Amino acid sequence: QVQLVESGGGLVQPGGSLRLSCVASGSIFSISAMGWYRQAPGKQRELVADSTSGGRTNYADSVKGRFTISRDNAKNTVYLQMNSLKPEDTAVYYCNAAIWVGLRKNNYWGQGTQVTVSS
């Protein structure tokens, strides 16, 4: 079994910062891509940022220049540093990872962490 556990969400004022963390644990052979998605009320889940095991990153246009994704592969952890937050960043943020368990690669999701940007 593999689990992804997120932390770091909360309430922040516009222009503020938050750092999300996601730790993968369990019967992990290796992790390829790790990333963050978000889902606002009444909207579809969307990609925020992701990172390959080699360090290549990809960002949604709406967060480029404000958010930074990083990984600590030794700790099976992915981070999302969010700066200059806007009310439209309010959403539940989900960690996602493609993880090899033995000879099989599966896609896993965390439980989500709420980010609210409001004055």
Image: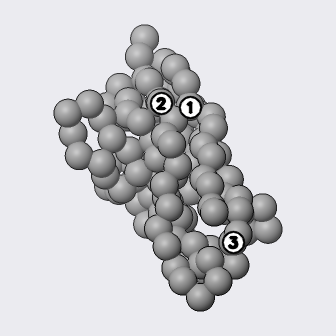
Identity, as a three-letter code, of the amino acid under mark 2: Gln
Which residue: 63% across, 63% down?
1
Spot occupied by residue 40 in the image (x, y as percentages of width and height): 30, 35
Instruction: Work out whether residue 112 or residue 73 is closer to the camera in this orientation and state it.
Output: 112
Which residue: 41% across, 51% down?
37
Spot occupied by residue 47 in the image (x, y as percentages of width and height): 36, 56
Which residue: 30% across, 48% down?
45
The reply to whether callout 1 and callout 2 are in contact (CB within 8 Å) is: yes
Dot label at residue 48: none
Identity, as a three-letter code, of the amino acid under mark 1: Gly
**Residue at the front extreme?**
1
Q: Which residue is mark 3?
A: 28
Where disc 1 sits, the SS reads: loop
Q: Which residue is mark 1?
A: 9
Dot label at residue 114: 2
Identity, as a three-letter code, of the amino acid under mark 3: Ile
Instruction: Work out whether residue 66 or residue 99 is closer to the camera in this orientation and state it.
Output: 99
Between discs 1 and 2, the one toward the N terminus: 1
Where disc 3 sits, the SS reads: loop
**Residue at the right extreme?**
74
Spot occupied by residue 8 in the image (x, y as percentages of width and height): 62, 34
Spot occupied by residue 106 in the image (x, y as percentages of width and height): 49, 73
Residue 97: in sight, yes or no? yes
**Residue at the top extreme?**
119
* Residue at mark 3 to residue at mark 1: CA–CA distance: 25 Å
Compared to 86, does 19 lie above or below? Answer: below
The reply to whether callout 3 and callout 2 are in contact (CB within 8 Å) is: no
Tag in front: 3 or 2: 3
